[in-house]
Image (tube, helix red, strand yellow):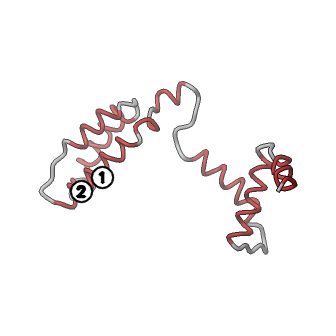
């Protein structure tokens, strides 16, 4: 959004991002960030729509962006931990040499692997026996 708002001014883009990320987003002040985004104006209808879309996104997801609260509980706020987990759980099982999977087979083996890693492997088999 900022790139479209200031397309030829990289310095202004950085100033806006730094100010709003450091002072609002990183401090969990999402409502103020939404207000700041919604107050932006552009003569370009495409940029105006992008601004509205961004403001709506932050408004809808505000509770997921309370970063100070999450950090206080020693929780991760970035996607890196999730991405690494996916790589470990999925990649290590499905991307071995010579393996080829159809979607149905991959989903089935991933369900088993996730249950195994979560200590719920026996629950899966108990459910299968009952069916």
Report the disc number at residue 86.
none
Q: Residue furthest front?
A: 131
Q: CA distance from mark 1 to mark 2?
A: 6 Å
Q: Nearer the viewer, residue 32 or 131?
A: 131
Q: Nearer the viewer, residue 109 or 3?
A: 109
Report the disc number at residue 53.
1
How many C-alpha atoms fall within 10 Å of the one at disc 1: few (<14), some, or many (≥20)? some
Q: Is residue 103 above or below residue 66?
A: below
Q: Is residue 15 above or below residue 48?
A: above
Secondary element under disc 2, as helix, strand or loop, is: helix
How many C-alpha atoms fall within 10 Å of the one at disc 2: few (<14), some, or many (≥20)? few
Q: Residue shown at 21%/58% (left/top)?
A: 8
Q: Position of residue 89 (x, y in %)?
A: 72, 54
Is 81 on the left or on the right of 131, as rendered? left
Is 121 on the left or on the right of 36, as rendered? right
Q: Residue shown at 23%/47% (left/top)?
A: 12
In the figure, residue 58 lies in which quadrant?
Answer: top left
Residue identified by numbered label 2: 49
Q: Position of residue 111 (x, y in %)?
A: 74, 56
Secondary element under disc 1, as helix, strand or loop, is: helix
Q: Residue shown at 72%/66% (left/top)?
A: 106
Asked if marks 1 and 2 touch (Cβ < 8 Å), the reply is: yes
Total marks shown come to: 2
Q: Residue furthest left?
A: 43
Instruction: Indicate the quadrant containing the C terminus: top left, top right, bottom left or bottom right.
Output: bottom right
Q: Nearer the viewer, residue 115 or 68?
A: 115
Q: Position of residue 21 (x, y in %)?
A: 35, 38
Is 40 on the left or on the right of 112, as rendered? left
Q: Is residue 48 above or below residue 15?
A: below
Q: Residue furthest top?
A: 72
Q: Position of residue 13 (x, y in %)?
A: 27, 49
């Amino acid at each position: 959004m900022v790139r479209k708002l200031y397309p030829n001014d990289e310095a202004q883009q950085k100033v806006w991002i730094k100010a709003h990320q450091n002072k609002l987003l990183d401090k969990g002040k999402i409502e103020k960030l939404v207000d700041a985004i919604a107050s932006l104006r552009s003569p370009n209808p495409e940029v105006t729509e992008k601004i509205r879309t961004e403001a709506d996104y932050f408004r809808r997801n505000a509770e997921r962006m309370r970063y100070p609260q999450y950090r206080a509980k020693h929780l991760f706020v970035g996607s890196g931990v999730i991405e690494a987990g996916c790589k470990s759980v999925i990649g290590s099982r499905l991307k071995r040499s010579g393996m080829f999977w159809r979607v149905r087979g991959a989903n089935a083996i991933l369900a088993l692997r996730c249950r195994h890693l979560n200590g719920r492997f026996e629950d899966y088999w108990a459910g299968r026996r009952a069916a």
